Amino acid sequence: MKEGQYNRYTGSKTAATKKSVVLIADDDNTSRRILSHFVQKMGYVPIVAEDGEECIRCLTEQAPNVILLDINMPKKDGFEVMLHMKAHNIVTTVIMITASHDIPHAVKCIKLGAFEYLTKPLSIDRLEIVMRNALAESSLQSQVQLLQKELKSQNLFRKIIGSSPAIKNTMEQVIQVMETDLNVLIIGESGSGKELFAEAIHYGSKRKKGPFVSVNCAAISNNLADSLLFGHVKGSFTGANTDHTGFFEQADNGTIFLDEIGDMDSDVQAKVLRALQEIKKIRRVGEKSEKSVNFRVISATNRDFSQAIKNNLFREDLYYRLEEFPLYIPPLRERPEDIPLLILHFLDEFSSANNLESLQLAPDALDSIEGYQWPGNIRELKNAVQRAAVTRKGNLIETLRSALIPGSAGSPLADKTLSDKSVEQLKAANNISWSIEEHERDAIIKAYKASLGNLTKTARMLGIGRATLYRKIDKFGLEYLKTG
């Protein structure tokens, strides 16, 4: 590159609303220095890389708006950098630069997605025009990506009703993990919607065109586990009249959802662990050879794994295989602002399913369930709404209180039958519970400090699993511990 080629630059700066970052990847020090100088005078922020590998690191760490990418570089050339970007879905506008006027090179650059192809020695006037257009393209791409992300989010979560901070936080975590291939352990109470979130993760991932296989782990007995999970061939045992494809093989190129994994028989746990340890290889009953299967595991539980592991009811080694990313689903009592939205949704659903006119909820109907803890979560709320809809008079539902099951856990109806002595006992129990929670919170903070901020060591020190620790951190308002 010749410095004399840049003397035509007029010195005018390109107007920009904010400083755009331009990555200059070139193995020639003089070229990097000169390009940095003029990029800065154009009003942008230059960063440099002297080879392909350093360029890829900068792409990951700096997220530039535009790359001025030399084709001929050591370690990885410009073509290899672009192939890496394509493989890892890195969307950044690329301007290819080379000393060669080779037309096949230019064609290859455009096919790989380059915005423009420039040859050395560069004309600064030409470079400025191309840079301005490239940044406009980059801005447009960013807007399109943002809109696509919003549309994707609306589509993925269309079955999940709610706008509370608690449920939005869970949705954000789903968006973060869905595009990875990490195994996800969903933790939540019965009726909180764990399978809906499992489906959202699958259909938002690169496996969305593959199958989503849901398995009720509690229903798998030890004597049928091998056949159900891994399949069998005809004649492998009495009654095996045809070949059978197991759940793991059915989930090839897709996702297997192991629901209520905490209730899985201990012998069956060992068989699942073996399939995961063998780099996703399975062997049908009656076959001698193994078969590689490409699946992702999402599992769900309403159990406390720390106690299950301590009591030898669940394998710790399997737990850590499943819990590569823990996802906590808040119970309904932690997202009360979502209850009106859910009620209206279930009323519309009921009206549509039964060909009824739109049912209305009286303004004070929500007051009748204030303070109810919803132990059955969303499933219980849906049942209550349906019962209230069936027993309504006209199209107006005046109360939901009568639709609750009297005497059920958390029911306000049970409070009316308490004696003064029972009320005092209940208050005392609540005080004890609060005291225990305070001690538990303090113990987490002390263990965190003693382990120097390592959450895995913190969990071990407390004798609980990482998923349980994360849940308690959220419960006690200690989210700052997650960020160190």
Image: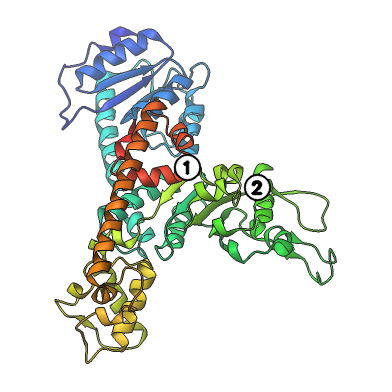
Rendered residue at 39%/24% (across/down): 58
Residue in the picture at 22% in, 14% down: 8
Dividing the picture into quarters, in which one does residue 36 lie? top left
Q: Position of residue 107 (x, y in %)?
A: 47, 33
Q: Do labels 2 and 1 touch, CB within 8 Å?
A: no
> Can you give x and y, in whole percent of width and height, for residue 146 in the image?
29, 47
Please give the count of numbered marks on the rendered protein: 2
Check the picture and name the quadrant holding the N terminus.
Answer: top left
Mark 1 closeness class: few <14, some 14–19, many ≥20 residues within 10 Å? some
Query: Is residue 376 shown above or below 2?
Result: below
Q: Amino acid at mark 1?
A: Ile
Nearest to the observer: residue 306 or residue 93 = 306
- The residue identified by callout 2 is 273
Residue sitting at x 46%, y 41%: 466
Q: Does dot 2 land on a helix, a strand or a loop?
A: helix
Find the residue positioned furthest to the front: 421
**156 is higher (above) or lower (below) than 324:** below
Residue 147 in sight: no
- Classify mark 2: residues with Cα within 10 Å, few (<14), some (14-19) or many (20+): some
Q: Report the side of 223 relative to 110 (left or right).
A: right
Residue underneath mark 1: 464
Of the pair 441 and 454, the residue shown nearer to us? 441
| Residue 380 visible, this orientation | yes
